[in-house]
Amino acid sequence: MSSITRARPSAAHPSPSKSRQRWRKFLSYYRPHLPLLAADLAAALIVAAAAVAQPLVANLVTTGLIGLPPGPDVLNQILLAGGLMLLLLAVQVGASFFVDYQGHMMGARIEADVRQELFEHAQKLSFGYHDRTRTGQLMSRITNDSLWLGELFHHGPEDLTITVLKFAGAMAVLVYVDPALAGCIALLVPFAVLYALHFNGRMSRALARSKQEIAAVNERVEDALGGIRVVQSFANERLESGRFATHNRRFLESRREGYRSEAWFSLGADTFAQLIVIIVIIIGALRVREGELTLADMLTFLLAVGVLVDPVQRLANIIRLWQEGHTGFVRAMEILEVEPDVADRPGAMALPRPSGAISFRDVGFHYAGGGAPVFSGLNLKIEAGSFVALVGPSGVGKTTLCSLIPRFYDVTAGALLLDGTDIRDITLASLRRQIGVVQQDVYLFAGTVAENLRYGRPDASEEEIVAAARAANAHDFITALPDGYATDIGQRGVRLSGGQKQRLTIARAFLKDPAVLIFDEATSALDTESERLVQESMARLAQGRTTIVIAHRLSTIRQAERILVLGPDGIEEDGTHEALMQQGGAYWRLQQLAARI
Ligand code: ADP
Ligand code: MG
């Protein structure tokens, strides 16, 4: 089930051009924050410079001390050097504070930008994408994974600056003080780098796997808690707990490799740092004994080694943050790189209010993923303003046919025209603005009744909302709610009955005032009384629009001007109830079936 979205090879080994593209994209996020980035880097530079300068000042004072008789000159020199070192410390503290605070804020701002972009992009992705992708997976990428992006964007440039400068600066001081000893230390560096690269790669792979596994855990939460009513009604909590435990365990296991590599990594960095100190002390002492190095220089050397070793010791932490951020970034890019299947064509035009004539011209359609074609060579004309009922056995493609009109999916052959214009030449927003769809499973948002109604037209006035609710037979039950129109209906509107929710969606459609209206089995889940109320409002809403009704109960569409019978080979029959009954074909058989139930 989740294997579709899991472990795409492209993620682990992107092509060079894709890497370059992602790299450019990464840098582009800094663009709106360049002044802050510059200030952050400058502060990082100051932190590193101040750290490197400390041993030099110390060198000044210690070298000055040796061999001089104690006197006011020496005292002055000590005080001067001490003052200088305190000043350096103050500068370093100030710059560090700026880096930690503003630098992190810059990272957080960029992270917010990426998250916003992700959300907006996920909203644009077409039905086809959302059919394939679980919401839990998307949620994980948009919320969890992006949490690390801020660290990457912040620590990326600035830690790099500090690490490189401190290392290079300290190295320079070492070479200046004692080239031979510095050479010994430099010999260790390639080994350290190789070691780091090895475990870095392992950490990166482990983290990528971890992120996939936590997304799978998220998916289970979404699925089981989203469907909690079904879970509880089947008393299947144990089954769900078991499934959750499986994914939870896999996540746990996936972290083992990550922590193992991280432990090796930080162990290596620490050991490397301590090795250097030991080498300096031993070789340094030997050289002092031989008279090749003064004690003062050795002290400077040890201080400089402290500066050199500091970024190395922090390296494990830094690299882990980068890795977390990097895998999160890659996972975000994977979403952003998906182009919506359904998008505005170049030159697509906004559609002024159409009259609502629909025509299918040799339409062929199959869902992505290699299923059998749902339609091929389908031809159908629906007059503007007419009322058409669409019937046919379950799974024959009624919903699919209606989904093609607002371009939830694009036809794979032929064309679909609205008022004579290929709908692909109309901007999506203006096309969908003109089409209202009322489905069997109602989706209401968390919020009040009024907010949900206003979703149909955000600028609707109070009066318009009430008028729409009245037309949808919803006003009476709304006013009977505890807070009337201001009642919070909770997520998915659980506190309303099916018929009430359906009437709210109809009121929402009234406010939208579309030219084309589609009812897809809108009443099939309702009891007779609710169905009557909903049907009444449907009839009212249908006035003056092209209306397509997919009906589950045939009794509800007898009065339709035109009944279309959809079969496996397309539209099989087309006519009024009476005409089709007389014909004694598919429609007649459907009626016989319905009568028997
Ligand atoms: P109806 O509404 O007439 O019951 P549908 O239009 O829902 O039928 O389905 C038509 C066919 O397309 C069915 O075989 C169904 O399995 C398939 N189908 C429907 N939705 C999807 C989808 N999102 N992805 C892949 N196949 C689908
Ligand atoms: Mg259907």
Image: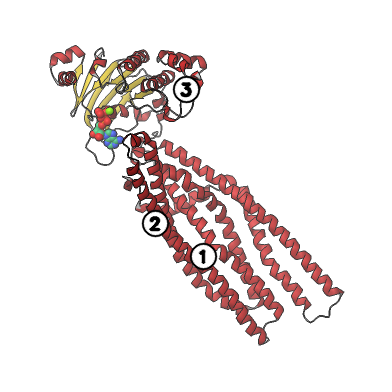
Residue under the point 63% across and 67% down: 307
Label 2 CB sits under 8 Å from any ligand 1 atom: no
- What residue sits right under mark 2 in the picture? 253
Query: Mark 1 touching mark 2, by CB under 8 A?
Result: no
Disc number placed over residue 266 in the picture, else none:
1
506 versus 143 height, above or below: above
Quarter location, residue 501:
top left
Question: Relative to 557, is 13 on the left or the right?
Answer: right
- Amino acid tagged 3: Val
Say which of 61 and 22 sits in front.
61
Label 1: how many Cα within 10 Å (few below 14, some 14–19, many 20+): many
Question: SS class of the residue under badge 3?
Answer: helix
- Amino acid tagged 1: Ser
- What residue sits right under mark 3 in the picture? 449
Give percent across and percent down for residue 175: 63, 75
Give percent across and percent down for residue 586: 15, 21
Residue under the point 39% across and 56% down: 253
The reply to whether residue 130 is in sight is yes
Question: SS class of the residue under badge 2?
Answer: helix
Give percent across and percent down for residue 498: 36, 23
**What's the distance in space between the residues labelled 1 and 3, CA to CA?**
56 Å
For the C terminus, the image quarter is top left
| Earlier residue among tags 1 and 3 | 1
Say which of 219 and 463 sits in front.
219
Disc number placed over residue 314 in the picture, else none:
none
Residue under the point 42% across and 16% down: 474
**What's the distance in space between the residues labelled 1 and 2, CA to CA?**
20 Å
Quadrant where ligand 2 appears: top left
